[in-house]
Image: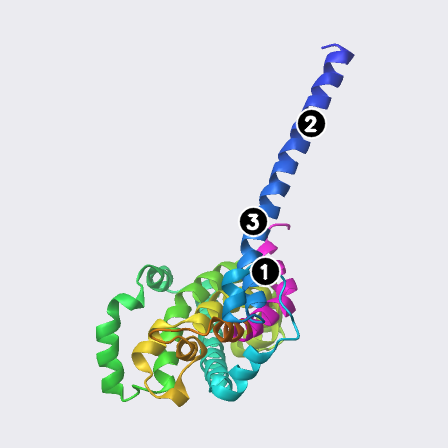
């Protein structure tokens, strides 16, 4: 092949790669816009009146107009709903990560008969939506005496979150070298010490992924609190925000203000843990 032909081939390949990279960048930018647009509109609407929301939905609001936020704090039990959501979500997440990590460590590190079956048993939970079993769940919670308590929600959320957590943690723990545990055993460390002091810090990125994977649906869940919680002082945020919606009229400004305030904690947590989240997503990609 002549030098001119080789040069033309190299230029064609470079142009092709640039075109492909440019297309990927355009797709990513468009996806970012699609994801952020609803959030921006929600924040803008939190500072508008009902009339402004429908007449100029895309216009910049007057950010000094905080009447909607004032109504949230003074005319509703928003703070009580926020505390309830924090208690339910925090307790559920703590139990999910603790139990899920312990189960995943046993499955990934110990060779015993039926370990594969135990893992498949957990994974099978991913295919069984608990909403289809709402009537048996209601009867079970009634018999346990936990209806209209936060314990009912915690039990359900832990059952929902364990399959995903065990699946994520098992795959991550299997990538860790066995030499770390062997060295610790030679130094006389117990199995519990090995898990909590040596392995747990190494699986922190995977725990962040499992935590984010579970905290968002738990925090935003409306269905189960609607079924199992009747008392107003026990309602979570998604359930409590329905008080802003009337049968004939809805104060959309106040509703969007409530949605903005309820989304803020999750967004803040994700920003703080974003580095750990990215590390967990890329772990194992490079040896």
Please give the range of residues in magenta. Answer: 261-287
Q: Are marks 3 and 1 in contact (CB under 8 Å)?
A: no
Residue 132 as seen in the image, left or right of residue 113 = left
In this rendering, which labeled residue sits more in front, label 3 or label 1? 3
Q: Which residue is mark 3?
A: 31
Q: Position of residue 149 (x, y in %)?
A: 35, 87
Q: Position of residue 12 (x, y in %)?
A: 69, 22
In this rendering, which labeled residue sits more in front, label 2 or label 3? 3
Splitting the image into 4 quarters, where does residue 217 fall?
bottom left
75 and 284: which one is in front? 75
Q: Position of residue 138 (x, y in %)?
A: 25, 78
Q: Which residue is mark 1?
A: 280
Residue 132 as seen in the image, left or right of residue 151 = left
Q: Is residue 91 above or below residue 127?
A: below
Residue 90 — which label? Answer: none
Helix, strand, or loop for circle 2? helix
Q: CA distance from mark 1 to mark 2?
A: 34 Å
Q: Is residue 148 above or below residue 94?
A: below
Residue 15 — which label? Answer: 2
Earlier residue among tags 2 and 3: 2
Residue 249 visible within the image: yes
């Amino acid at each position: 092949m002549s030098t001119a032909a080789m040069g033309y081939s190299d230029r064609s390949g470079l142009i092709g790669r640039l075109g492909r990279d440019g297309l990927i960048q355009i797709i990513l930018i468009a996806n970012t816009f699609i994801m952020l647009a609803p959030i921006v509109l929600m924040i803008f609407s939190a500072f508008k009146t009902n009339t402004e929301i429908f007449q100029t939905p895309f216009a910049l609001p007057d950010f000094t107009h905080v009447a909607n936020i004032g109504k949230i704090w003074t005319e509703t039990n928003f703070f009580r709903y926020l505390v309830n959501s924090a208690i339910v979500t925090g307790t559920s997440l703590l139990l999910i990560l603790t139990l899920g990590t312990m189960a995943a460590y046993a499955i990934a590190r110990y060779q015993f008969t039926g370990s594969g079956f135990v893992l498949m048993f957990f994974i099978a939970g991913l295919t069984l939506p608990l909403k289809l079993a709402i009537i048996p769940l209601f009867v079970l919670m009634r018999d346990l005496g936990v209806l209209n308590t936060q314990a009912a929600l915690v039990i359900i959320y832990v059952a929902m979150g364990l399959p995903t957590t065990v699946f994520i943690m098992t795959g991550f723990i299997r990538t860790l070298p066995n030499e770390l545990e062997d060295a610790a055993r030679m130094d006389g460390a117990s199995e519990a010490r090995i898990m909590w002091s040596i392995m747990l810090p190494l699986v922190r990125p995977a725990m962040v992924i499992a935590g984010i994977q579970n905290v968002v649906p738990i925090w935003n869940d409306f269905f189960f609190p609607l079924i199992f919680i009747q008392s107003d002082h026990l309602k979570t945020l998604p359930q409590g925000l329905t008080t802003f919606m009337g049968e004939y009229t809805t104060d959309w400004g106040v509703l969007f203000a409530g949605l903005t305030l309820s989304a803020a904690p999750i967004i803040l947590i994700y920003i703080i843990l974003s580095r750990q989240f990215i590390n967990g997503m890329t772990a194992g990609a490079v040896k």
